[in-house]
Amino acid sequence: MEHLSDNQLLDLLNPQGPPAGPQADHLAGCEDCRRRLADLRQTWDVLGQWSVEDREVDLTARIMSQAQPARTIRLWQPRALVRVAAAIALGVALGSLAGRPGAPAISHEQVSEAMYLDVLALQSPTGWTSPLLEETGSN
Amino acid sequence: MRLGRGHMPALAELVRRHQRRALQLAYRSLGDWHLAEDVVQESFLRVNRAAPKYRPDAQFTTWFYRIVVNLCMDELRKRRRRAETTTEALSEASTSESPADREERAELHQAVHRALEKLNERERLAVILHRFEGHSHRQIAEITESSASAVESLLVRAYRKLRADLAPFANNLPEKAQENAGPGV
């Protein structure tokens, strides 16, 4: 059997690697491959000394706050169209009401007061209503 | 996949289940916890965005790790362009250790990190996936979207470089390390 490749040696170190099988037999009789495997194992072991403690952090809340599905309104959907139309109608109605000039209810007292003032104006000594009277008289 | 139908509790469950290993992978690649958190967060957000298009023809973990690894790769490239060096303390202090042991361990951590930093991005990520995440050559090939033979070449080259850099530390390993060396033969 040929000497084991570096990859085969790496497989022998990795717990996820394939079972040793015939490679183990070769190793038993090949000092050169055993030495290469020992060298590789040393590197493997030194790397294994780099332990990383668990990070006491939970990213769940942080991720969920950014991962909420975006709510997109598509105008071509019937329900969205009804909503938009209702909103426009409501806006127009409110705008119309808000824009109409105030029309306070007129009481009988106010009407009679106005008529009384009209009569007084006819008899005014200052004569400031005379143009009006003339105009009225001409009619 | 429930996530594909906008099932948000499914995303939360995925985060809870995979964040720990993803954080360790990102940290080992980048040497910076804050950056690692950002990368992992972005990875899950990408999973969420891509979920409707996800087809379970690959294992979820393979797909997810591919995203994490690609983002780490981007960060490493950015860093190389900026020629930054990592300054974050890489040693994880353990309260049960004596100061001398802690110092020795910190020195070893720094040496391992420096040796990994000298590898190119692809070699580095391949070694991290192989040595620390326990992935096989074939799994690494799927995650990195490379051929198995390309991954094997990467690993062989990377371990050769690492062996040269870490040889001085090989004889000072604690006995426990020899016991944790994996199955071997």
Image: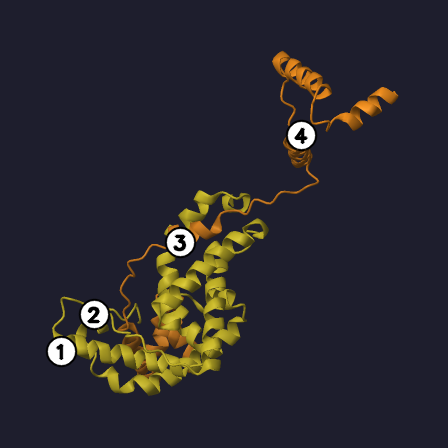
Chain colours: A orange, B yellow
SS for dot 1: helix
Element type at mark 3: helix
Q: Quadrant of residue B135?
A: bottom left
The chain containing the residue under callout 3 comes to: A
Residue A86 in the image: state x and y as whole percent: 66, 31
How far apart marks 1 and 3 lie (CA) works out to 38 Å
Q: Chain of mark 1?
A: B
For discs 4 and 1, the disc positioned in front in the rendered view = 4
Query: Is the same chain shared between marks 3 and 2?
Result: no
* Subunit bearing disc 4: A
Please name which of the two marks, 4 or 3, marks the residue nearer to the observer: 4
Residue A52, horizontal then vertical, whole percent? 29, 67
**Residue that mark 1 sits on:** B100
Mark closer to the chain start, 4 or 3: 3
Residue underneath mark 2: B93
Assess whether mark 4 and mark 2 are in contact (beta carbons under 8 angstroms).
no
**Nearer the observer, B142 or B98:** B98
Which of B76 and B109 lies nearest the eye of the viewer? B76
Q: Which residue is mark 4?
A: A101
Query: Which amino acid, by three-letter code, is at mark 1?
Result: Ala
- Secondary structure at numbered mark 4: loop
> What's the residue at 63%, 12% (across, down)?
A108
- Between the C-alphas of marks 4 and 1, the distance is 90 Å
